[in-house]
Amino acid sequence: MQPTSTIPASLRSAFDRIARDVEGAVADLARMLTLDTAFLGTSYAGFADLLEELLAPFALETRRVSVLGPLWHVPPAARRCGNE
């Protein structure tokens, strides 16, 4: 962990809370990892909901960005990375 003096004030309370409750932070991380966030996963909204919930106590500004499918969809032929 960084020395406290190099942590921006806006994040200091979050770092302090993690340091005080490492087990809770690990439990929160486990909650994040159990959601399907694969490229075509179905839990983007659920993951965003969870992050907003976990960040709420710190009064950090959050912004959810939703991108329409046609803007991020990759055709099957383009998914090949030359590893055939």
Image (spheres, rainbow, N blue to C red):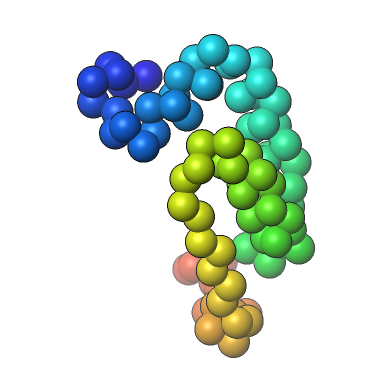
What x and y, as percent, mark residue 42? 76, 63
Q: Above or below — where is 56 with respect to 45?
A: above
Q: Above or below — where is 30 with respect to 18?
A: below
Observer-nearest of 55 and 28:
55
- The residue at the point 68 percent across, 40 percent down is 33
- Image quarter (top left, top right, bottom left or bottom right) of the C terminus: bottom right
Classify residue 69 by image quadrant: bottom right
In this rendering, would 15 be left or right of 53? Answer: left
- The residue at the point 49 percent across, 15 percent down is 19
Q: Above or below — where is 75 with respect to 21?
A: below
On the question of residue 19 being in view, the answer is: yes
Please, which residue is most extreme toward the bottom here? 70
- The residue at the point 31 percent across, 32 percent down is 9
Please, which residue is most extreme toward the left here? 5
Classify residue 11 by image quadrant: top left
- Image quarter (top left, top right, bottom left or bottom right) of the N terminus: top left
What x and y, as percent, mark residue 56? 59, 42
- The residue at the point 47 percent across, 45 percent down is 60
In this rendering, would 58 be left or right of 8? Answer: right
